[in-house]
Image: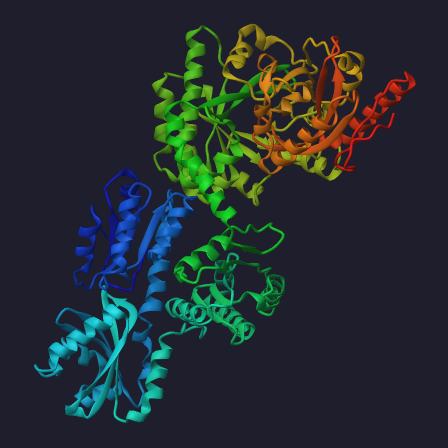
Amino acid sequence: MIDSSNNILEVILLFGEIPENTTVAENLPKQIMVTFLQSAEDSLKYLSKATVITRLVILDLIHYKKQGLDFLRLRKDNSLVKDIPVLSMTLPNDLDSVIKAFELGSSDYFTYPISPELLNTRILELLENKKKQKECFLLEEPNFGNSENGVAFFTYTRHCLTPLYANSKVLEQHQFPSSEEFCSGIPNALDLFGADIRPQLESKIEKAIETQGSFTFFMKAHSLQVQMSWLPYLYSGAPVFLLVSINNYEQDAKQKELVTMLELDSLTGLYNREAFYRKTENLIKENPETTYLYIRWNVVRFKMINDRFGNTKGNSVLRHLAKGFLNWVNQRGVCGRFYSDQFAICMPKNEFDPEQFSRFSVELLHETCLTMNLQMSFGMYEIQDISLPVERMNDRAKLAMRSIKENDTDPYCYYSEAMRNKVLSAQKIMDSFENALNTKQFIIYLQPIYNIHENKFISAEALVRWITPENGMVAPLEFIPLFEENGFIQKLDLYVLEQVCILQRSLLTEGKKPIPISSNLSRVDFFNPDLYKEIIAIVDTYELPHSLIKLEITETAYMDNPKQLLQTISVLQKHGFEILMDDFGSGYSSLNTLQKVPIDILKLDQLFTSEIGTSNKAETIIQNIVNMALGINLQVVAEGIETQEQANFYRSIGCNTLQGYFFSKPISENDYRLLVDSDAIKQPIPKHLKSLTLPTSNLFFRRYGKLLQTVFLTIFELNTSRDTFKTIYANSSFTALPFGTAGALSEMESKVIEKLIHADDQKHYHEETTLFLSKNKGKTGSYHTSEFRMLNCNGFYISVFRIIVKTKNTNGENLFLTLLAKKEDRKLASAIMESIKDLEDKKKKDFSYSMLHEEPETQALG
């Protein structure tokens, strides 16, 4: 429950009562007032009204990006509104909007969809941070109470200077027993000044707000010199002033000391955010010839320290870190703490060694003597344009910091334009989603699941593929994680479910007997409390028995939102849907999840399967998992079967339901319809998949084709005049590559092949190919080897070993063959080529080869 430490909290939602915003509003605690406002101008007018209500703005940058950024721009220039906390709601990878929002003063952001608990926590943390950062002066009695100078804080609204706090010196001067009675007894401190001074004083106050400065005046009645300083704080939406009255003009040093105290973080003594920004700006502008680094640093999962050891220990860790950083910087730059474990440093680049600082940070964390392995990360931005606002420098360093993953080699990273471009590329994918959905660019492929005991296929899993008219297939790994982060996956999962229902209904209408198909549900789907209603509604729309639809979930869904997941699957199971747990064993608490979640079918993660034949320990673990699952009446499906050895192992331990490329790759809807034919279901599983061999006039392949087929996945015939590839052979393992059925393999443009190659390898691939072709116009039998990463039809990049061979056809025309093998078969593939060379040598024919990756020139060896 949110407690803002005020009687009332009002959350302002900008700019409309659309479903996403009403969902956010509905998930806020009931004691919070929620107000929807429609325009930037109206919002500023509303927020400018003085009030005792604590306010927080949630800004919708998903649907109202332009209006939202306009609001932030106008807010920056409105002293009565600029420090009201703003939470910007964005899509997860829309970092461009996040950066712009932070540049314009957004306090924080969150991504939609978000769990109610997490949203409420974010609001609470923001309010608490604001309270600590902006209103800490209300708790500073030990610092100000015994000062020899009069110290008071006021808020200012037009024609009204309202007291917030007064120390004992001010109380003595005005004869009040307590600060509370002073504040209630003088509702407007402007009344303490004469009518002749008051207009001039107000003018100075308003100018100080505009310039964010201070001014001095003399109170004759008390023979006091008084300084009023604008502070970068708001209280109930109004700007705050510090007033210091001095009897002795020589006490300026103490006055400055009091002001300085407000620049420091009360826990660590480092600069707070506002002071750090100002000091950094001054530092880099005073030293324009020096190149500086802006560094953002944090502890990975710092919250775990507070949860495990308590806030007192957590605060001790933060103070220790602050002391260490201050010693490290040692007058060379500026050091600050923004909140929690978020630290910032600005210092000359030539005096900062990231590796050395990384080791220093690890030592600092080790010195805290906590019985847990603490990790940290920091991002760096090299300041090249000193006119860039410090807030934007901060955003770039923070972007670099957030890009670091826990398994990265280094815990630090520099900001780069490539990083920003990656964000923009992701944004382009997200921007294409709605159109792709509306134009049915998302299609389903189905991978059969076989029962090897009954020798037939008994089910299938629906997988989504995105085929764009411009660029062909988009790898699932490129869009699924993005859509999970921004919530699009919810629409996509329901779309896939509906396509499965359409297929099942079509098969029933045709008089065929469909088998159950499982459709995947993302962990994000379970943040929707109406998920089960939408699933049931879709299936019932097509009048399908619920037994024809199965639903696959993952362990992460339970870890993210256990209560909602358990409620949802309980209802679905009562309505006749079977629930499968996919990728079992890939999570951190698999057995605990298995105990808590009432699933019907367990799918073993393919990582287990890949260890069969190489690890006795893995095989023992698999056998025990299968025995345990069968012992609690769970069906088990083993995923990732690629070899006969793996299939035999599972059969031997009593696991007869298998899925993988050994039986079938994911197939198109048309091919699946053929498989579902009632006669086809009764056919036994083929012992191996059939190879594909197409007619060719290539003499080299005719002579050595049988030998080549023992190792190579596929062989293409390259026509350099038309720049096309023609497939002349593809073996059973060729299903690891994403070219589809045999009919689609006959001839493809070179650019189709190149698009399947990893972006980082394309330049190298193209340059090597061009170089080889240009150097081997007349050298029949020469060849060149290389390696690159290629997209398979599951959306993963696999490493392949390529050989290009110069050959001739029956008409004596030059042809080039491209042979692809698995990377692990490189030695065997090379040995085969050497064997062919030996055969050619025996026939006393010229056969030469080129290893361009080892030698600069193609050389004849035969």
- Which residue does the image show at 14% across and 72% down from the upper left? 160
Question: Where is residue 709 shown, x and y percent of the image?
Answer: 75, 18
**Position above or below: 234 against 548:** below
Q: Looking at the rendering, which quadrant does residue 204 occupy?
A: bottom left
x 46%, y 26%: residue:
470
Residue 566 seen anywhere in this rendered image of the structure: no
Reply above or below: 828 against 34.
above
Please, is residue 820 above or below residue 407 in the view?
above
- Measured from the top left, where is residue 312 in percent x and y? 47, 70
Query: Image point 32% across, 93% down: which residue?
Result: 250
Q: Number of callouts in the render?
A: 0
Q: Where residue 90 appears, x then y in whole percent?
A: 36, 45
Foreground residue, 536 or 463? 463
Q: Quadrant of residue 220?
A: bottom left
- Give the position of the C terminus as an image quadrant: top right
Q: Residue at x 53, y 35 (%)?
A: 477
The colouring scheme, among rainbow, by chain, secondary structure or one colour, is rainbow
383 sits to left or right of 23: right
Q: Nearer the viewer, residue 478 or 120?
A: 478
Q: Is residue 745 above or below residue 145?
A: above
Camera-side residue of 463 and 754: 754
- Residue 382 visible in the snapshot: yes
Residue 658: image location, x then y, percent: 62, 24
Q: Is residue 508 left or right of residue 580?
A: left
* The N terminus, quarter of image: bottom left
